[in-house]
Amino acid sequence: MIAQDGGNGWNRREEHWLAVLAQIETGQRATLVAVLDAQVVGYGSLLWRSGYPGFAAADIPEVHDLATLAQHRGKGVATSLIAALEDLARQRGHQVTGLGVGLYADYGPAQRLYTRLGYRPDGNGVTYRHTPVVSGALFPIDDELLLWLTRRL
């Protein structure tokens, strides 16, 4: 496989993809792939049971692991993937979907996209590795520090 400029979500280790396939096979995850001219340009998943306790308790499926090749960003690939994932959730009777987004600048375009699509903070603050962050605690600013957003379908 040739490495592509799609950020951390694109160039993952084989173990990650094997775990994704196992989750698809067991029905824990639905994954969609965007293809243009026989090239994969994006992908995204819907976790039927989120690892985030707030979503799990409310039975909110999580839009997860969304990635678009750099040269195809801003062309509607991620928007189309999210809409299709939301349709899958709607087909199963869900009225809300959620997602987590990182807090540093690399996530700026995603933050803007999600708010443009109507996603709003769930009101529970940020988490680090799915554990709520409390005032005064110190955490690294990395991909595990997330703000959780929801959208009514």
Image (tube, rainbow, N blue to C red):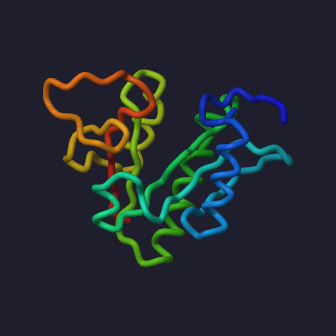
Q: Residue at coordinates 38% horizontally, 55% vertically from top-left?
A: 98
Name of the residue lying farthest toward the front:
15
Q: Residue at x 43, y 63 (%)?
A: 49
Q: Would you place residue 137 above or below residue 36 in this image?
A: above
Residue nearest the observer in this picture, 43 or 140? 140
- Screen quadrant of the C terminus: bottom left
Q: In the depicted view, which residue is nearer to us: 92 or 129?
A: 129
Vertical side of 149 occupied by 90: above or below: below
Position of residue 82 measured from the top left corner of the image (x, y, whole percent): 52, 54
Count of numbered tags = 0
The residue drawn where x is 68% and y is 43% is: 15
x, y percent for residue 57: 28, 64
**Point 84% across, 36% down: residue:** 1
Q: Position of residue 36 (x, y in %)?
A: 78, 47
Relative height, residue 65 to residue 29 (above, below): above
Name the side, left or right, on which 10 lies relative to 51: right
